[in-house]
Structure formats: C-alpha cells, structure tokens
Image (cartoon, rainbow, N blue to C red):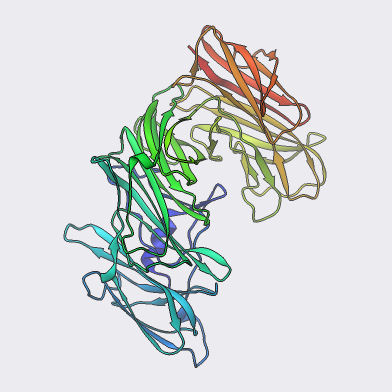
Amino acid sequence: MVGRRAAVVLGALAVLAAGTAQPVHAAPAPPAPRRTGLPYGLARSRIVGTPMRQARPLSTRSFSATAPEVTIDVLDRSGRPPTTDETDSVLFIPLDGGDWLSAEVRDGHAEAAVPAGAYAVSAYVMSTGANGETSTTLIYRSKVSVTGDTALTLDARTARPIRAAVDRAAARTVGIAAVLTQRLGSRVETVALLDGPDNFVTPTGDDSELTFRLQAQLTKDGAATSPYLYAIGAARDGIPADPGLRVRTRDLAAVRTGYAGEGGPACVGTSAGVDWGTGLSVEGWTGQGPLPATRTEYLSPGLNWLRSEYVTGTDCGFAFDDTDVRSRTERYPGAGSYARRWSAAPAGPAAGSLHWQTGQEPALVVRMLSSQDAQSSIAPYAHMTGTSTLRDATGQVVATSDQPGSANDWTHPAPGKYTLTVDANRDAPWSDLATRQHVVWNLTVDDAARVALPVLRYATALDADGRARAGRNQTITVTPDGTGGTPALQVSYDDGESWTSTPLHRSGNGWTAQVRNPASGYVSLRGTVAGVVDQTVIRAYGVG
C-alpha cells in the first residue's frame, strides 16, 4: 500500500499544474515541515508541476506462482527496526519504466511476491529525536536485481545529513529540498522528494542514470525578514557521500531586488525554487516584510529560478483569499551584479487562452493582475469581483462565468464570430491601482480546440509605491503579447470619464508613448488593436 503518512502529507501539499491545484498521488514521501515562525496560509513550500506516479500495492496484484519472494528488513539510523508509524511501506520502481509497486511494512519487516526484474528500491524512515523534532531519512537503492527469492536490508545507518551553507557567518537555512530523478526506460522521472530542514539520505556513489538535485534558501539568522536572501542549487550524478551544498558568495549572481508597493500598507512574501526541467519543482518560502522593500538576493547562476511574490495586508497572514500572487522565471548567466524589480503597476492581463475540449479545465485562462515583469495567478483574486462572458455575432450570451478571466465547463460553440468580455472590479486594502478592468476580444471560432487571447502589456518607470512624478512627461511602453497589427493608446485622467488619444512610436519589439502626468490623481490606459482586442485599466498608476 502507499504509505498512510505519505499520502496524507503530499496530498495536503498539492501540486500546482497549469494554474490549477491538484492533489498529489505519489509514492511514499516525507512531510514538509511548517516553517518556524511563519504564518500558515501561502507562506510555505509549494510543489509545482507533475506529481510522481502512484504506486500500486503488491497486496492487490496477482503474479505467477514462480514470482520471487522478496523479504525486506528496514533499520533506522540507530540500527533498530522502525515502528509501523515510522515506516509503513517500501517502494519498488521498475527500471524499465513499468508500474511502480509498494509493499506494506510492519515494524520494519515486509514480505511480498515481486515480479523478476531490475528495480530501484526506497523507503522513508521517520525518527523523533530527544528534542521532539522529527527527521526523515530516505533509504535509496538505485539498482536492485530480483532474479529469485531475495533478502534486502534497507539500512538508514549509512545515511548522511542534507545541509546547505554559504560563506556568511549569520546565514541560516530556512528551506531545503532535494529532488531525486532517475532514468526509467526511455524517460527520466522524479522518484523521490525531500522537503524540510532535517533530512538524511543514503549515498549511492556515482550513477549516470540517477541525479540528486538540491536547492536551499538562507537568510540572516534564519529570520523571515532579512536584508539578504541566498537561493542556491546544484545537480549531481548519483547521491554523493556528502549530499550537502556549500557555496561562496563570489560565485553567485548578486541581484539587487526591489519590491514595489501599490499605494497602501502591505506585507510582501517571496518564494524561490529551481525549475530542474524534470516536471516537478519545489518553491521554498524565502521571507516576508513590509512593502515597499529592497534586498540583495544571491542566486546560483545558470539555473532557471521559479520566483513568486505574495502581497497581502499588514498582518502578513497570507491567507489564500487575501493575497495577490505574481510569478516569473529568472536566470542569470554568471556571477556578478544584477538589478531586478517586482513592479505592481501598471497591472493588467497577460496573454490567455480558451480551451474547448473536456479535461482542460479551466476552459478560460487570463491572468488579470499581471505586471510588466511577472504573471499573476488566475481567478479567484483577493478583493476582486467580475465576470467573463462569451457572446455570438448577434450579441446572444453563449457562456458566462462569475470570475474575471476564468471559467469552467465552456463547451465548444458552433464555428463563427464571437466576442469575449472580461470585467473586473478591485478594492484591495493594499492597493488603489487597477481598480477596474474591461477587456473585449474579437474571436473567430473554428474546429480548433484552443483559441489564443492576445493582449497589450504596459510598462513605465514608477517609484516604489507605483507613483509617477506630477507634471512630468511619462514614457509608456506598449508591448504586444501575442497580437499582430498596430496598437492605439488612449489615456484618461478622470477614471475613464473622458479619453485622449496619444501617439505611439515604434521602438524595438514594442511601441512607446509620451504622456503628460497631471498634478495629482491617477492615469488610466486604454489600448486597442483593431478587430483583435480592446483593453482598459482604470488607475494604471498613481501620480504624486
């Protein structure tokens, strides 16, 4: 059977795939401990991507009478058999890519009929120390040949601690995660995951078919608020004798990173994790503090870093229904100095899509609070209401949703011309920007299962609170995101009551306009591509 403890833990974590939370169905895996001193809402690790395969219990399978009998004895790090609560299953992973199998363990012992073949064999052992803290040991044998009756001892006494360190005396680990991948048949798959501060793993030595991928986040004194962040990672063949990770600051990308506010008091949280290109990643929580904020972030170069920003109220609660989330991927080619910014304004939609076929929920995906340098999550949003409506050429409503930019169960309509309208109204306590949005797409529906929803993205230089200087000329960049044609831009200084056309000039991959800021208030933007999209954001940025 799949380990009871593992099923509960990973099911609670959830995998975020294509913007939709899905339960994890995976082989046995340890819990991800809650971060000490951090709130429990979104301020935790996220597992992102495709879940590991479900293991089939050997007790439910029928094999030939000649199938070998395998006897397994598990020992914890002290050399004793673990209790059933500490280890309740052993996993058999066929190296030819076949179905994963699990054997039930009772008080450190298991017996099961297993088809002859070559396997990776693993078990997790939970241990409670004298201080009451729980640690997890992954026992992993990357190549076990079962050709006849076999006796295996899975011994945690050979395990080594998984640690991370940098050459900065005050830096302490706040998150550490190991992802183990192995070639199974023609595919490389994630076969084990360890996420937590006190984990151990048994070395395998060099193994070109097995990769140990380790990442960690460190802050000053391990505090949630810190003037710096270290996000480090490395991949190695096999599980090394010392599975830890140690780096020097001079070998990292030093990124001076600004986090902009939106006009009201707010708290920001961040996460970071490596996209290893294996289908599954872990984003570890990397701290929090008041907005606006600036800190230096040291990242391992040459890796694709998944970064997320979470904005909530001053209580730093990060509840799911009280937090805005934006994400992006960062990659730095080498060590050295860099500068990056998380901008809150102007906010608006990123290019989206409609998916007509079943099994591709949500049917509508438009990320309505995306900024110039990151994409937002999809609805529902904190403190935002709205609708999404599909109409045919006669204006008849074909489908509707009570969420802006998101919908389920929209079936494929008849071929023809359609309009999709998304309206959003926002009243977040930390923001007086992007208070209303109105976006209309003109669509041609044919037999294709997917319809692209192109947009225009806005960018402009603002201060740390999303404000521009009063009475000055403001350069606004308009960049097509999936659109063709020539855009047009209008501006409003009275929340959309009146509009003034503003010339656009070609510049690189986009267009630029010069806008004269008023003495105070807000600037709203309306961008159009004739026959394609018409999008309005009220209070795109503030002035003063």
Left or right of 447, for residue 528: left
Q: Nearer the viewer, residue 7 or 63?
A: 63
Residue 121 in the image: above or below residue 308: below
Give the position of the N terminus as an image quadrant.
bottom left
Spot the residue most to the left: 130
Q: Is residue 322 visible?
A: no
Residue beneath the point at 49% across and 28% down: 343
Left or right of 111, for residue 372: right
User: Residue 175, how many percent across, how many down?
Assistant: 34, 48
Q: Is residue 128 visible?
A: yes
Q: Which quadrant of the view contains residue 416?
A: top right
Q: Which quadrant of the view contains residue 98?
A: bottom right
Q: Nearer the viewer, residue 18 or 203?
A: 203
Q: Nearer the viewer, residue 218 or 89?
A: 218
User: Residue 494, how many percent across, how many down?
Assistant: 60, 12
Residue 534 in the image: above or below residue 93: above
Spot the residue most to the bottom: 65
Residue beneath the point at 75% across and 32% down: 484
Q: How many marks?
A: 0
Left or right of 23, for residue 87: left
Residue beneath the point at 61% across and 13% down: 515
Residue 24 in the image: above or below residue 507: below
User: Residue 187, how many percent across, how many down?
Assistant: 56, 66
Left or right of 308, for residue 107: left
Q: Which quadrant of the view contains residue 442?
A: top right
Residue 405 in the image: above or below residue 89: above
User: Residue 318, how many percent across, how many down?
Assistant: 39, 38
